[in-house]
Amino acid sequence: HPHGLDDDAFDAMFTLDRPIVFAFHGYPGLIHRLTYRRHNHDNLHVRGYKEEGTTTTAFDMVVLNNIDRYQLALDAIRRIPRLGHLVDDATRRYDASIARHKAYISEYGEDLPEVRDWRWPA
């Protein structure tokens, strides 16, 4: 595309040899189609909309589509070899967080306060 990044700019941003976890609000296939000729495409892992979920909370929609903050962090940990020793503990923490999330929305019908009220630090 004439307005897209040239290969050098793309490589500078996404590297030639490191894992990439890309969270996208649309279908993951679109990102794969846009990047399949780029360097390091094999290390590109895209999370995005999978048409999962129904009438539920905002955070539950991202959980159901595997693009929540916990899943993305776990994806990154799994793809960085030097963090391999953290995978088991991170997986346990992820599973516990998601179980707590599901129990809370089942009882209260809204997201956990720490999710709902979270803001970027100023």
Image: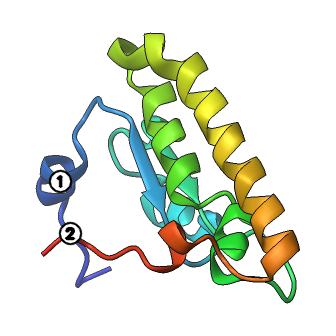
Tell me if I can see residue 49 in this picture: no
Q: In which quarter of the image is residue 48?
A: bottom right
Horizontal side of residue 35 vs 9, given as left or right? right
Distance from the alpha carbon under mark 1 to that under mark 2: 10 Å
Instruction: Give the residue type at disc 2.
Output: Leu
Quadrant location, the C terminus: bottom left
Q: Quadrant of residue 61?
A: bottom right
Identify the residue at horizontal 79%, vertical 79% (top origin).
108
Tell me if I can see residue 48 in this picture: yes
Which numbered tag is attached to residue 13? 1
- Report x, y in % for residue 92: 65, 28
Horizontal side of residue 94 vs 16, given as left or right? right
Compare marks 1 and 2 and give the one earlier in the sequence.
2
The answer to the question of whether label 1 and label 2 lie on touching residues, with beta carbons closer than 8 A, is yes
Identify the residue at horizontal 23%, vertical 84% (top origin).
3
Q: How is the image coloured?
A: rainbow
- Label 2 sits on residue: 5
Horizontal side of residue 108 vs 120, given as left or right? right
Quadrant location, the N terminus: bottom left
Q: How crowded is mark 2: few (under 14 residues within 10 Å), some or many (20 or more)?
A: few
Instruction: Give the residue type at disc 1.
Output: Met
How many marks are shown on the rendered structure?
2
Location of residue 16 with respect to 106 vertically, above or below:
above
Identify the residue at horizontal 62%, vertical 70% (top origin).
112
Q: In which quarter of the image is residue 91?
A: top right
